[in-house]
Amino acid sequence: MSNSDSNAPGWLRPATEYGPLLTFFVAFYAGGKDLITATGAFMVAVLIVILLLAVWRQRPPIMFIVTTVIVLVFGGLTLWFEDERFIKMKPTIVQCLFAVVLLGGLYFKRPLLKPLLESAWPLQDRGWWILSWRFAIFFIVMAALNEAVWRNVSTEIWLNFKIFGILILTFAFTALQVPVFSRYKMETADADKPDNSPDQ
């Protein structure tokens, strides 16, 4: 999230990142395990997040904007048709979109993880290529896994997988990339130099 306004409170970032998901989870159980009701609460929480970002003049990342649009579209379809399948398919669409973006960047010789994460992890270009490939494959696997879960288990199990399972698997996969971060890490002095190396 961009810090265009340094006066934004410290709770804003975690609230915007986890608030809607927590609302979804609580509303599901508080509403008698009704996914339609939980979806409505989820969408209200997302709209509140957008309002909070506007109040504190925060410019969200492009992927946040894209996923928010997908949430509103699939959440709206879920409520309009009263059909749980739309909101259950939302993680599949998001994961596939991430994979397509990363693979498209690699096709055009631009590892798109680099502009997103290089401020936190300065890596050599080779490292960004490896991570972009791995994360693209990971997102494809997660999309397929979400499809397998929601089509074969109860709504309650799927919801817990969506909130906890996907999060745990993502953290675990990222932790497994530590050797790549270590091997291709750029020193501070090198990271400040322009990268004139040829494409890998």
Image: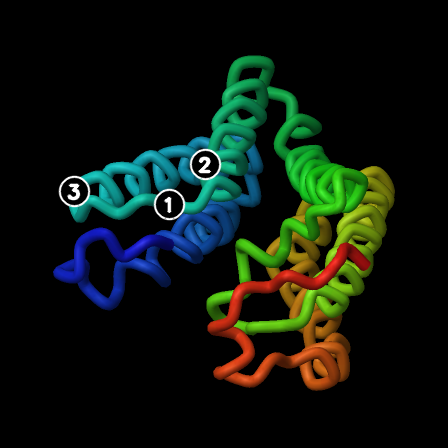
Q: Residue furthest top?
A: 81
Residue 3 x %, y %:
27, 57
Q: Amino acid at mark 2?
A: Ile
Q: Is residue 193 visible?
A: yes
Q: In front: 198, or 175?
A: 198
Q: Which residue is mark 3?
A: 55
Q: Is residue 82 left or right of residue 50?
A: right
Q: Look at the numbered disc 1 and give the secondary structure of its residue.
A: loop
Judging by the rendered image, the residue that carries numbered circle 1 is 60
The residue type indicated by label 3 comes to Val
> Quarter of the image containing the C terminus?
bottom right
Residue identified by numbered label 2: 65
**Residue 154 seen from this side:** no
Image coordinates of residue 6 in percent, x first then y, are: 17, 61
Q: Earlier in the sequence, mark 3 or mark 1?
A: 3
Instruction: Name the residue rendered at 48%, 46% in the picture.
Output: 24
Note whether 6 is above or below 158 in the view shown. Answer: below
Q: Residues within 10 Å of mark 1 (few under 14, many from 20)?
A: some
How far is the residue under mark 1 from the one under mark 2? 7 Å
Residue 177 or 28: which is nearer the viewer?
177
Q: Amino acid at mark 1?
A: Pro
Indicate which disc, 1 or 2, sits on the residue closer to the N terminus.
1
